[in-house]
Image (cartoon, helix red, strand yellow):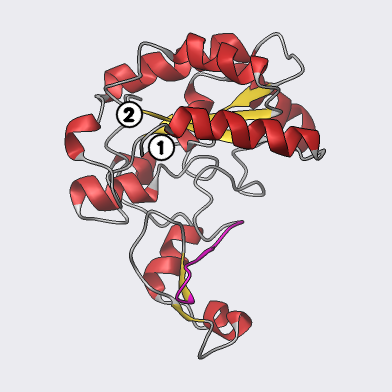
């Protein structure tokens, strides 16, 4: 989009003037992976309240040649972690389930709040169908904005009915009945891997997250 950054700056300024809380989400690509500190500083100057960051997912207009490697992504998330602490006025984080692999302070905070986070009482990580759904402009309901699988359409059925009659794949995702190394990983319930990345890059929505760098014995 021509002059996209200028338009974003203007929109943030107008929203701040009206008292809105500003959330931004930066997508890491081959083009900007080395500029994360500068992007974070720009967000601070613009008065952003919450700064989120995650990898590009090849969906919609996103092109595969913009993808970074999982090693590069690990480095990017480590950069975000260093910028997150000490906590400042602008909250910095990533909604990517893999962020827990670098943010050990967050893990400690969760343990302090919930106790044994591996007990099965706490489920987190990939939010697809867990604590969020995506409803497209045509009324179609999906587990997340990057997944193409339809659950139904709110123009023809109530959302409650769509959710009640969700298919087995959806139930498997929510219950973390997933495959590959994700299946045997102790972090399965608090992470679950990104289902969109698994679906797009391996053609298996229940497969392991191909960006995960954690070694499983």
x and y, in percent, of residue 217 in the image? 31, 27
Main SS of the magenta segment? loop
Examine the rendering and report whether any part of residue 163 can be seen.
Answer: yes
Residue on which disc 2 sits: 216
Q: Are marks 1 and 2 in contact (CB under 8 Å)?
A: yes
> Is 217 situated left or right of 192 in this image?
left
Residue 185: mark: 1
Image position of 39 with respect to 149: above or below: above
The magenta region covers: 131-139
Name the quadrant of the N terminus: top left
Q: Quadrant of residue 87?
A: top right
> Is 78 situated left or right of 116 in this image?
left
Residue 192: say if magenta: no
Which residue sits furthest left? 65
Residue in the foreground of this view, choosing between 154 and 110: 154
x and y, in percent, of residue 210 in the image? 27, 37
Which residue occupies 59% across, 38% down? 118
Residue 134: say if magenta: yes
Which residue occupies 70% across, 36% down? 14
Which residue occupies 67% across, 49% down? 121
Which residue occupies 45% across, 45% down? 192
Q: Secondary structure at mark 2?
A: loop
Residue in the foreground of this view, choosing between 199 and 109: 199
x and y, in percent, of residue 163 in the image? 55, 77
Examine the rendering and report whether any part of residue 25 can be seen.
Answer: no
x and y, in percent, of residue 34 in the image? 36, 11
């Amino acid at each position: 989009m021509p002059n996209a950054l200028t338009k974003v700056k203007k929109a943030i300024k107008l929203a701040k003037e009206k008292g809105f809380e500003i959330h931004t989400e930066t997508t890491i690509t081959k083009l900007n992976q080395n500029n994360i500190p500068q992007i974070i500083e720009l967000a601070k100057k613009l008065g952003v309240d919450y700064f989120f960051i995650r990898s590009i997912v090849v969906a919609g207009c996103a092109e595969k040649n913009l993808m970074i490697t999982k090693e590069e992504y690990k480095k990017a998330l480590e950069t975000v972690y260093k910028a997150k602490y000490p906590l400042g006025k602008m909250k910095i984080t990533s909604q990517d389930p893999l962020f827990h692999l670098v943010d050990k302070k967050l893990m400690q905070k969760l343990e302090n709040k919930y106790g044994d986070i591996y007990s099965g009482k706490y489920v987190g990580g990939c939010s697809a169908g867990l604590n969020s759904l995506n409803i497209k402009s045509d009324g179609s309901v999906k587990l997340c904005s990057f997944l193409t699988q339809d659950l139904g359409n709110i123009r023809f059925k109530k959302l409650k009915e769509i959710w009640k009659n969700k298919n087995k794949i959806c139930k498997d995702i929510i219950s973390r009945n997933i495959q590959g190394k994700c299946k045997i990983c102790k972090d399965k319930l608090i992470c679950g891997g990104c289902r969109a990345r698994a679906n797009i890059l391996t053609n298996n929505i229940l497969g392991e997250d191909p960006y995960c760098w954690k070694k499983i014995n």
